[in-house]
Structure formats: C-alpha cells, structure tokens
Amino acid sequence: MHSKSAYYLAAFIGTTVGGLIPSLWGAGFLSYSSLIFSTIGGILAIVITYKYL
C-alpha cells in the first residue's frame, strides 16, 4: 500500500511547478494556461509517484 502523504506531496509540487511554467512567457498566475498546466503537472506527478513508488 502506498502512502497518501507521498501522493499529496507529489500533487502539491506538480501543481506548483505546472502553475509557474506559463510565467516563463509572461502569462499571469491565474491565467487559463496556468490552470491547464497546473492540472497537467498535478496529474503527471501523481502518475509518476504511482509508477515509481
């Protein structure tokens, strides 16, 4: 059984990094691209945690 805290930490880091990526091209923190990248980052982080934990 995997630890829930590892998934929470991965989701937090993934959404944070994903939300900050659009700021590299000048998009706002609450722009649509930031929300999309934040969602994608969180999902990818959870999948990677599930696969390698």
Image (cartoon, rainbow, N blue to C red):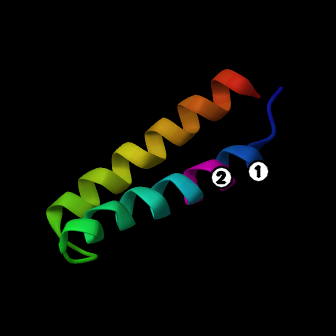
Residue farthest to the top, as pictured: 51
**Vertical placement of residue 15 versus 51, above or below:** below
Which residue is pictured at 76% across the width and 28% down the height? 53
Left or right: 13 in relation to 7: left
Q: Secondary structure at mark 1?
A: helix
Which residue occupies the foreground of this view, 24 or 51? Answer: 24
Residue 8: which numbered mark, if any?
2
How packed is label 2: few (under 14 Cα within 10 Å), some, or many (20 or more)?
A: some
Which residue is pictured at 24% across the width and 74% down the height? 30
How packed is label 1: few (under 14 Cα within 10 Å), some, or many (20 or more)?
A: few
x, y percent for residue 36: 25, 52
Left or right: 11 in relation to 32: right
**Vertical placement of residue 37 versus 24, above or below:** above
Does the residue at mark 1 contact the one at mark 2 (Cβ under 8 Å)? yes
| Magenta part of the chain | 8-12
Left or right: 26 in relation to 47: left
x, y percent for residue 5: 76, 50
Instruction: Tell me the kind of residue under disc 2.
Output: Tyr
Where the N terminus falls, by quadrant? top right
Left or right: 8 in relation to 2: left
Which residue is pictured at 80% across the width and 31% down the height? 2
Q: Quadrant of residue 32?
A: bottom left
- Residues under labels 1 and 2: Cα distance? 5 Å
x, y percent for residue 14: 51, 52
x, y percent for residue 34: 26, 63
Q: Magenta-highlighted stretch: main secondary structure? A: helix
Residue that label 1 marks: 5
Instruction: Tell me the kind of residue under disc 1.
Output: Ser
Q: Secondary structure at mark 2?
A: helix
**Vertical placement of residue 23 versus 45, above or below:** below
